[in-house]
Amino acid sequence: MNSNEAPIIEVVDLVRKFGDRTVLNDISFNVHRGETLVIMGGSGCGKSTLLRHMIGSMKPTSGSVKIFGEEIATMKEREIGRVRQRFGMLFQSGALLASLTVGENVALPLFQHTERSADEIEEIVKQKLQMVGLTGFEDLKPDEISGGMKKRVGLARALALDPELLFSDEPTSGLDPIMTAVVDQLTLKLAHGSHMTAVVVSHDMTSAFRIATRMIMLGHGSIVAQGTPEEIRTSTNPEVHQFINGEADGPIPLNLSQDEHEHHQHVKPRPFVSARFRFHHKTP
Ligand SMILES: Nc1ncnc2c1ncn2[C@@H]1O[C@H](COP(=O)(O)OP(=O)(O)O)[C@@H](O)[C@H]1O
Ligand SMILES: [Mg+2]
């Protein structure tokens, strides 16, 4: 990280409300080139919402979000499209197109944003799938592969254009410990070898401490703590301590995440559902 250089991302006084609920409350931080910033915090605390503001897919209620020195919060969709070519995004669900094969999903940004020939694109797709351990899976459809594999295809697609900046939302959730380590090592390799900057949302503490050069912990809409992994590990803040040690009792209030929130709306309340939620939130 070079602190003389302008930050790659500058978030200043970001506020986001949904109705009268304030989900992000006056958040400010910078991301510098070469950093791997991990954003952590409990379910529903606003991590995905914060990421969506950084990539310009959500607009703030107030405040500013600059990416590569440009204000993305007020940008028109066409300008955002131009900025999007410079970063990759791995969504929490993988967000693959169900009608396309694995290979076509990874090829999509290359067809959309480059002039490369079909042969060159095929070669790049092979190489990106190899990076995530999915050689030979080109011709399968997303619904023929597991959740963890979808996630890795999403990562291959996010890396298709060799972005200088990668956003990932829970890149290792749903992966087994070995695949988690593979994805983490890939992030580390890209950060060190290609000087890629990464902003990673994670609640997997093993993974977070493995890849982070800096960490931010969100809670009740604000930044509870930020610092180096060592500073976070030795923090005396009770919320940080509870979170990184996965303790059930402590100052962090229970909350529903976006996914559970959506699920909750689609499912008629039945006794076993609320029992499952209760159980789920007791288990870190
Ligand atoms: N589009 C939306 N409309 C209304 N509420 C939302 C929307 N997106 C997120 N929220 C709410 O914002 C809060 C934070 O959600 P989210 O950012 O998905 O949390 P996290 O990723 O930390 O689990 C949740 O309470 C969620 O219900
Ligand atoms: Mg989320």
Image (tube, rainbow, N blue to C red):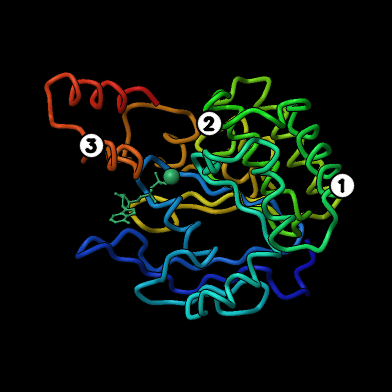
Residue 170 versus residue 38: which sits nearer the camera?
Answer: 170
Mark 1, residue position: 119
Q: Which quarter of the figure is the C terminus placed in?
A: top left
Task: Determine contact: label 3, label 1, CB under 8 Å.
Answer: no
Badge 1 local density, few (<14 within 10 Å), some, or many (20+)?
few
Q: Tell me if 247 is positioned left or right of 142 in this view.
A: left
Front position among marks 3 and 1: 1
Residue 71 on image: x %, y %: 56, 79
Amino acid, disc 3: His
In the image shown, does 118 or 280 lie closer to the viewer? Answer: 118
Residue sitting at x 55%, y 63%: 55
Kindly indicate the quadrant of the structure image that contains residue 257: top left
Secondary structure beneath dot 1 equals: helix
Q: Residue at x 45, y 51 (%)?
A: 48
Which label is found at residue 173? 2
- Label 2, label 3: how far apart the Cα atoms are: 20 Å
Whole-percent x, y for residue 126 in the image: 81, 37
Disc 3: which residue: 264
Decide which of tag 3 and tag 1 comes sooner along the chain.
Answer: 1
* Neighbour tally class for label 3: few under 14, some 14-19, many 20 plus, Cα within 10 Å: some
Disc 3 from disc 1: Cα separation? 45 Å
Give the residue at x 83% y 45%. Answer: 124
